[in-house]
Amino acid sequence: MKIYKKIILDKNNKLIKEDFFEYSGKIASVMGIHYDFKSTRSAKLMEKQAKREKKLAERKAKRLAKEGPKKDVNKKDTLDPNQPLDLNFITNPNKE
């Protein structure tokens, strides 16, 4: 495992100089990448949103199962798109 003492990069993040030493002690086996809260925040937010959407879908399915199938009431359209509007139709209070 490399233990860095000094790393020098240029403005394009190209390595100019590095100063390190090799370490192979007891602690080297447990060392690794450690994540902080900021690096895992987006993944946690996506998991939270997926969990919320799943719960809402389950609630909706449960509610629909409890209510039973919806009864479709077919309303008779008063306006037929194939017939032109005339004055009698517009002024008729019964609108048959």
Image (cartoon, rainbow, N blue to C red):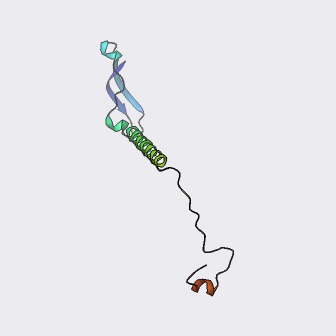
Q: Position of residue 38 (x, y in %)?
A: 33, 38
Q: Does 5 sit left or right of 56 as displayed?
A: left
Determine whether 57 is above or below 82 in the image: above
Q: Residue at (37%, 28%) from the top-left corner? A: 17
Image height of 87 relative to 55, above or below: below
Name the foreground residue: 26 vs 58.
Answer: 58
Residue 58: tell me if it is visible. Answer: yes
Asked whether 62 or 27 is in front, the reply is 62
Q: Is residue 84 above or below residue 76?
A: below
Q: Position of residue 84 (x, y in %)?
A: 67, 80
Provide residue 89's location: percent of width, then percent of height. Answer: 61, 83
Q: Residue at x 59, y 84 (%)?
A: 90
Q: Is residue 22 visible?
A: no
Please give the name of the residue rendered at 60% of the width and 69% of the height, measured from the top-left corner.
76
Q: Is residue 52 above or below residue 80?
A: above
The N terminus appears in which quarter of the rendering? top left
Q: Name which quarter of the figure residue 4 lies in.
A: top left
